């Protein structure tokens, strides 16, 4: 074990030290200096598909690695299938607003299409099932996840009346999951790594939470909730805090999902680019590829985890908004109800 | 490293894009509505049904178990009662048999004693009768003998008195 670990560390360190005398060191040493590297020089040895697609924009020979990475993370209106060419997506504009079909829109549609086909197939096969038959195939997979969301996420966080929120929670879970997974496929893009998409999803959660709170407590109870049950002299502090608190929840959801999905991809691309920056096959074999694979597998896990976390927190916020709180708050709420 | 960081901020990672927000909202809303109908509705209702089914099966199993236990208890009670009944019957039968046996032996004893007594009486009577007959016979024989003797020597009357006296003496000594 120890020998293995040491050899692994050596494999990491030696190539780096070997490359230190190259001008790459000078480049990374003077951080402001643009990384003027002709990535094309190393491109034939590109070890991963992502890298090949990343290398192409550098055909001009003046591309910074950071630009290439951002090009992959960010939304744009061309769908690049690198060696085969690219598809330019149409620009649309309604009433002065730009509603172009971008790469992430296409990914969202793709995810929706996959989700609709798979989930509807599962729903149809479940419908055909009699009570004494065991489910099988894709219905089984979907059913296991649905049951997990239903029992461990919705029921345990929302409690009574969780059924109303179940379609939203299930949809958001599967939607995020499919988007996350599509981002891991070569040529794909992670729509959930775009802050606009995650913002929209958390706005859904926000509205559902607010409506649920209004329905559960009424207008008076809702306003009373904003005072957090404190003495009226504290309201001038408590009310703004509570109102801000209403918005921090969806904000946290937005940033968490977006940052997690973006970070993973940046790490994978950065690891690949280390080998281009250092211009070393040894680095590529010893660092970039194994670590990129490791992070890729981690991303696979994160795809499920973040979908779960988003759903879990949505359920939690809905549960908090609808719950009849105990303790000192209860008297105020009871007063509001009678 | 830092170059990437700067580009990250410059590159518009946080740029708002109303078009994308619009499309996401529309797409997600449509997906939500369609899936609610086609997928989540049937799947969730099936899960609930199954949950209820399993619950009722468990309940039924529990009630069946309770019932079986009560039946077992009743059976055991019945068995022990039957055992006690059988014991009692056997004991009663034995007692009755003892009683009957002792009664029978007693009766038989009484009967046999009665029969023995009757036989003794009869034997006594027979003996007495036989003695009477014997006495008469002996008297006649003696008389005839005496007659023959007396015919030869004495008259019969004197001889008879002598023999009668002798017989009376004999009877008295025997009784």
Image (tube, coloured by chain):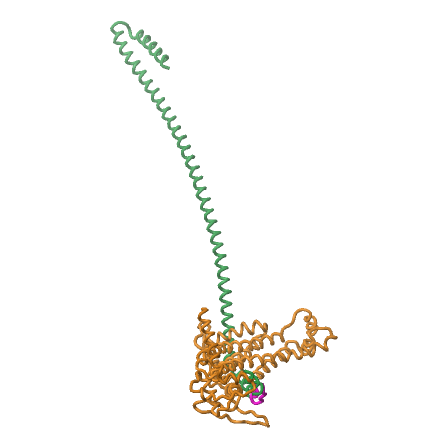
Residue sticking out furthest to the top: B153
Residue sticking out furthest to the front: A21
Q: Which residues are magenta?
A: B12-22
Residue sticking out furthest to the right: A233
Residue B25: x and y in percent read 56, 86
Magenta highlight on residue B19: yes
Residue drawn at x 42%, y 85% is A45
Residue drawn at x 58%, y 76% is A313
Residue drawn at x 56%, y 90% is B19
Q: Which one is nearer the viewer's eye here, B93 or A22?
A: A22
Q: Is residue A280 above or below residue B173?
A: below
Drawn colour of chain B? green
Residue A183: x and y in percent read 49, 83
Q: Which one is nearer the viewer's eye here, A313 or A130?
A: A313
Q: Is residue A119 visible?
A: yes
Q: Is residue A7 above or below residue A284?
A: above
Horizontal side of A47 relative to A262 (left or right) equals: left
Location of residue B165 (image quadrant):
top left
Q: Which one is nearer the viewer's eye here, B174 or A141?
A: A141
Q: Which one is nearer the viewer's eye here, B165 or A279?
A: A279
């Amino acid at each position: 074990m120890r020998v293995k670990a040491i050899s692994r560390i050596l494999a990491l360190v030696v190539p780096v030290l070997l490359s230190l005398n190259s001008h790459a060191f000078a480049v990374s040493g003077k951080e402001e200096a643009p990384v003027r590297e002709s990535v094309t020089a190393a491109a034939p040895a590109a070890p991963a598909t992502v890298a090949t697609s990343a290398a192409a924009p550098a055909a001009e020979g003046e591309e910074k690695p950071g630009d290439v990475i951002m090009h992959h993370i960010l939304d744009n209106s061309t769908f690049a299938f690198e060696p085969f060419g690219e598809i330019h997506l149409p620009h649309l504009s309604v009433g002065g607003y730009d509603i172009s079909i971008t790469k992430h829109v296409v990914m969202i549609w793709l995810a929706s299409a996959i989700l609709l086909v798979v989930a509807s197939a599962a729903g149809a096969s479940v419908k055909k099932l009699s009570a004494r038959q065991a489910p099988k195939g894709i219905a089984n997979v979907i059913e296991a996840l649905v049951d997990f969301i239903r029992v461990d996420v919705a029921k345990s966080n929302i409690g009574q009346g969780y059924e109303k929120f179940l379609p939203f929670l299930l949809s958001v879970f599967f939607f995020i999951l499919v988007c996350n997974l599509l981002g891991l496929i070569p040529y794909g893009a992670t729509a959930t790594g775009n802050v606009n998409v995650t913002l929209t999803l958390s706005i859904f959660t926000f509205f559902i939470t607010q409506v649920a709170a209004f329905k559960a407590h009424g207008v008076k109870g809702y306003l009373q909730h904003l005072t957090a049950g404190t003495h009226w002299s504290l309201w001038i502090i408590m009310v703004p805090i509570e109102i801000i608190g209403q918005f921090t929840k969806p904000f946290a959801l937005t940033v968490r999902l977006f940052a997690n999905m973006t970070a993973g991809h940046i790490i994978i691309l950065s690891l690949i680019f280390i080998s281009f920056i250092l211009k070393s096959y040894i680095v590529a074999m010893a660092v970039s590829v194994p670590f990129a694979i490791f992070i890729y597998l981690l991303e696979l896990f994160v795809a499920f985890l973040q979908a779960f976390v988003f759903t879990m927190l949505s359920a939690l916020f809905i549960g908090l908004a609808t719950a009849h709180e105990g303790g000192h708050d209860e008297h105020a709420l009871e007063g509001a109800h009678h | 490293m830092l170059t990437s960081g700067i580009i990250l901020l410059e590159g518009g990672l946080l740029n708002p894009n109303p078009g994308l927000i619009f499309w996401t909202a529309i797409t997600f809303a449509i997906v939500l509505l369609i899936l609610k109908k086609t997928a989540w509705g049937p799947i969730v209702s099936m899960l609930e049904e199954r949950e209820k089914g399993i619950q009722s099966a468990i309940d039924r199993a529990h009630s069946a178990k309770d019932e079986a236990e009560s039946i077992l208890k009743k059976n055991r009670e019945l068995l022990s009662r039957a055992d006690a009944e059988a014991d009692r019957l056997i004991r009663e039968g034995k007692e009755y048999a003892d009683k009957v046996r002792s009664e029978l032996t007693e009766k038989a004893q009484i009967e046999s004693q009665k029969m023995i007594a009757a036989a003794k009486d009869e034997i006594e009577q027979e003996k007495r009768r036989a003695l009477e007959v014997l006495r008469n016979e002996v008297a006649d024989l003696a008389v005839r003998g005496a007659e023959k003797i007396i015919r030869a020597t004495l008259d019969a009357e004197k001889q008879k008195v002598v023999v009668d006296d002798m017989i009376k003496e004999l009877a008295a000594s025997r009784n």
